[in-house]
Image (spheres, coloured by chain):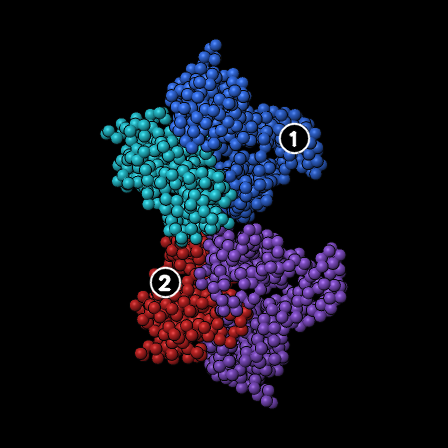
Chain colours: A purple, B blue, C red, D cyan
Amino acid sequence: MKIHEYQAKNLMKQFGIPVMDSRVAESMDDGIAIVQDMFDSGIKRMFIKAQIHAGGRGKAGGIAEIRSMDDAVKALNRILGMRLVNNQTGPEGKIVHKVMIVEADRAIVQELYAGIILDREHELPLLLVSAKGGVDIEELAVKHPEAILRQSIDPWLGLMDFQARNLAVDLGLTGKTVDFAIRTFTGMYHMFMNLDCSQIEINPLAIDPDSNMFALDAKVALDESAFFKHPELKLLHDPLEESPLEIWAAKNKLNYVKLDGEIGCMVNGAGLAMATMDTINHFRGKPANFLDVGGGANTETITEAFKILLSDNSVRAVLINIFGGIVRCDRVAEGIIRAAQDSAIDRPLVIRLAGTNAAQGMDLLRRSGLSLETACCLDEAAERVVALANEGVNR
Amino acid sequence: MKIHEYQAKNLMKQFGIPVMDSRVAESMDDGIAIVQDMFDSGIKRMFIKAQIHAGGRGKAGGIAEIRSMDDAVKALNRILGMRLVNNQTGPEGKIVHKVMIVEADRAIVQELYAGIILDREHELPLLLVSAKGGVDIEELAVKHPEAILRQSIDPWLGLMDFQARNLAVDLGLTGKTVDFAIRTFTGMYHMFMNLDCSQIEINPLAIDPDSNMFALDAKVALDESAFFKHPELKLLHDPLEESPLEIWAAKNKLNYVKLDGEIGCMVNGAGLAMATMDTINHFRGKPANFLDVGGGANTETITEAFKILLSDNSVRAVLINIFGGIVRCDRVAEGIIRAAQDSAIDRPLVIRLAGTNAAQGMDLLRRSGLSLETACCLDEAAERVVALANEGVNR
Amino acid sequence: MSILVSRDSKVIVQGITGREGTFHTESMKKYGTRIVAGVTPGKGGTRIMDIPIFDSMKKAVQTTDADTSIIFVPPRFATDAIFEAADSGITLIVCITEGIPAIDMMKVKKHLKSIGVRLIGPNCPGLITPGECKIGIMPSPIHRPGRVGVVSRSGTLTYEVISQITEVGLGQSTAVGIGGDPIPGTDFVDCLELFQNDPGTDAVVLIGEIGGNSEERAAMFVHDHMSKPVIGFIAGKTAPPGKRMGHAGAIIAGGKGTASEKIKAMESAGVHVVSRLSEVGKTLLRSLDH
Amino acid sequence: MSILVSRDSKVIVQGITGREGTFHTESMKKYGTRIVAGVTPGKGGTRIMDIPIFDSMKKAVQTTDADTSIIFVPPRFATDAIFEAADSGITLIVCITEGIPAIDMMKVKKHLKSIGVRLIGPNCPGLITPGECKIGIMPSPIHRPGRVGVVSRSGTLTYEVISQITEVGLGQSTAVGIGGDPIPGTDFVDCLELFQNDPGTDAVVLIGEIGGNSEERAAMFVHDHMSKPVIGFIAGKTAPPGKRMGHAGAIIAGGKGTASEKIKAMESAGVHVVSRLSEVGKTLLRSLDH
């Protein structure tokens, strides 16, 4: 689960990572009061930063520099409520509901990069640092891989001081900045392990003219599977960051991801759901979503799944692909029939059942009198649903 | 470093180990006020427990049961300021400066034992538990070793729930007491590792009729070498628990332990100091102390060491045994001469120097005009100092 | 022949008294799996389906001499259950539970490696040697004894593929679901090596998906060490970057782990990559004709 | 011949610019030890006594190909220094520093064991192969090349014993101070095994003290595996229980670790236990006459 920059920085503070104090506003009034307060306390320059779960906010107009109340009013007006669009938000963009206001009086002489991820290949936390901060790290990794220094961390031993120090020295740091770097890297590691993060990124990690170091930006993702250990982290979830359909699906324990196509899919199993999307794509259709109804596909989950699919206006036809294993296909068919009767299905529906009692299930569907098509295999189903979706457009 | 029961329990609370709330009094007035307060809050029965660094306080009269203010006054009068003597305090006993007052309304249906030590043989933390709590564990270990269950803990993995649970089950616990035991054992382990303890002991670990578990007594020792990690733990040091001479020595970075003999010793190196004590003993003398002046035996340390030795009235003669290595014996001799001139040495002094420049050193001593004897070897020195000590008595 | 499990496997079910545990224990038992004990702390001494229940793995293993365990406990307790199994003398642990934190798995795996205990999963359907023994939650009837090894990060997708293998007239030596988590206890390479060395396996079907680079490493292994034909399928060609596709491990992160990278790596390593799911069975048949 | 260190040892001094580090580096250099580098973070690129200083062990080892390090850094940094040395490719680490927390040492030792790096100390005087190489803080002149191995938990007490050995006309193959901490990196048994296998050692003097049971374990090793005579001395016969006698490890705790237990164990294992310090030299001579 991604969290906001301001939330990430609050967590970082708890782990001794140096960050600038910042405050959050959700309205013009709050924003103006905060800015006024900060000017009053002697701060001369600040940034107003849109709080959305996406990078590249600066280029997309989500960050403003403030030197006067006038600047502040203009910036707050512009940013609060704006639809920020860039390659990280997807074409639909993200509405800005919150801004972070942060002091920016300190000059910056150098911008570094520091991040920790779980390295799936070596199955260890991996600390990545670079003297070339402030740029896109994925791009840097491709263009200048040698500019990124790496330190794998043994979870039994933790990040040791000498490892952090050697990285700092290799980054070209000296004097007290080395100590700052040790504190920052060690804090990042402790945060990563103690909060079960899946990613921590500080980019840029800034150095001021007095050799102080602090996190200018912060990106943190948390492992939702570990929330049972840290129930307080659950509260950092911002529902405004997800599409309403995704929230609805999550409430019903459905794995749903909105995509930008026109064919709704309902599948049991994540791998099969992806393979179904791929098959639709093969027949030149575009899936409108990923939807895994899970192992226990019953009437309730299927009903909810239907509602979610149909409430997406871009869906022009629906494909259901269920492989009956422990769940028998005749039961699934009964569920589909009941759910279809409950929902007003106003778009073409193609169903393919396979596995345990598939024939009985298909038979039930065909005899249900519902307006739906059955297919014997995935290829046929996908081809047919794409055709139906196109018919809808051409009609 | 040993700490008091009440301090140990406060630390335990931070690690989720269930303890009864308690308060500490250092005076009659405080004690009476606390007891009154506790009676007022509805508590009907409490214990007043002497806070000294020794077990066996109950048998030595350091614990009193209180059911009325009258009981409380009597108990406080008796215990505060008492000299508590048992085999753990040594013959000189310990003055009680503080008492802990603790609720005792809950009945107790079973008393267990739980302790963690650093197992030097396997070099791992070792959790020891027994269903036979409330008795001396060393005695139990000798008489009923099978009554003590052991679990070595891998520091990389920590004490795992299943290990704690299996111990609880093997202790015969059931139901929610098992969960209490898991919490207690796990808390003890975390405390042991996170505070660098050298020992944690809960004896007895009590179970009440409602299957609740709590620590009735608590004994904790801390690794002083780790105080740089936990400076706050240093503050738990109670100087009243040490002999004034030991505190004086510690201030001067001298390793001094008061013993009950009559021959003061000053040696460089802990092993050599012990061997010197053993040699004195061989010649039927009894060492009055262990004193290691360390590697850098210079005029200052020797002067302080002299002062400490001579301020111990049981010392009847002093043996100095220095092996000059990096520190040259002529330098040591100069130090001794200057220190002896500064201190008024009123008891016989035998000096043996060996190693680097020993002959020069001995020569300096002999020509110093001071009233001291030199010896060529440790045996001679020990034999002579014992004789001089006995002469003093016979004189 | 088979890998990892056979009719001789003696299995303990951890969490046998839970709903899932009981349901699948019955199914496994019916399949012929030797379920010798169950473990549920606090229920030691009782029985379920005539299977003795113990309070701890240690006691269960001491009494039954089991070599394998299958875990159905909730995620909060699953890590501890794995450690307990590993400590008890079990040599193969199959963890069905979904939702174990990745950092915990990292620690689990490091420990298991150091003591030489193998874990399948977590978040996996388990494994089956058709006709001998099922240690998992897969539907029994789709399987048939045979000489094709199957290894997969997926569940129903694997069943789909297994059905195809069975439908084209072949069967499976062993089918292993390694699970969809970022850090699986056993990975493709481990299974490929076992299949390569198993005289009962003639070909291997590998079902991968987006995320991580275990398919790339598998490709390297195939290239360097395998003589048997390997048929590959990768799900998620149309998955967008940065979005988790159900499985915790199925995510294109930092531009890495795309299906096209994986397909490229596998093809250049000589794997017969199937581009459409429906073609797996046929491709397998063709590869065996060579 | 010798154990652990010889004229070929290439040594890095960690903490070379500290007072102790500089002082003893000079002494070691004078003795003929090949000090090839020093490490002090932040002082890389400078020199001291013509020895190049590096910022990190990694760079120092890469540049000099050293195999041994000696640590003089304060206790707060010593654990990290050991880990850094272990990570750099060094195979023998000698830690002079006193005051490393016992729990840290436990972790250090577990790690070093897993990667096969040997640590002498901490809280020890180091070790010396007379005439070849001194990696420690012991006074040089008392030593003489010879065929007696010495291993000890103590400092000055060892010098006393070594003087006696030298005075009776013998010399030392190697003398190892394993240190007075509860968890020493290398213990008596390790050294006894090395001495037993060293053709340059004819007899071993073992100097123990109260606390722990490493002398008892040494006795068992002598009994089971040693053919060379072993002379033993235990300090602390008159030490009271529960009081730490200077060394962190020298404490009779829980009634365990008394001198009499140790002496008993050693005597019944065939060790020539010397009851009075002054008798070590003579007893050694007698044991060699047999």
Residue that protrudes farthest toward the bottom in the picture: A395
Residue under label 1, please give it. Answer: B26
Say which residue appears at 59% left-offset and 41% top-offset: B232
Q: Could you say where residue A128 lies in the image, as x and y percent from the top left?
A: 51, 60
| Tag 1 and tag 2, C-beta contact below 8 Å | no
In percent of width and height, residue A193 lies at: 53, 55
Which of the 4 image quadrants contains residue B282? top left
User: In the image as oriented, which residue stretches furthest toward the left?
Assistant: D290
Looking at the image, residue C290 lies above or below residue B132 = below
Which residue lies at the image location 45% right of the left edge and 24% below the top edge?
Answer: B333
SS for dot 2? loop
Query: Mark 2 belongs to which subunit?
Result: C
Write down the residue under mark 2.
Answer: C4
Along the line of sight, the residue nearer the viewer: C15 or A160: A160
Q: CA distance from mark 1 to mark 2?
A: 68 Å
Q: Position of residue C144 (x, y in %)?
A: 37, 72
Nearer the observer, A96 or A55: A55
User: Quick check: D65 above or below D120?
Assistant: below
In the displayed structure, does residue A107 sit left or right of residue A140? right
Is A364 rendered above or below residue B390? below
Question: Can you tell which of label 1 and label 2 is closer to the viewer?
Answer: 1
Residue depicted at x 60% and y 69%: A56
Considering the numbered disc 1 on the image, is that residue within a helix, a strand or a loop? Answer: loop
Q: Is residue C80 visible?
A: no
Circle 1 chain: B
What amino acid is found at the position of numbered circle 1 in the picture?
A: Glu
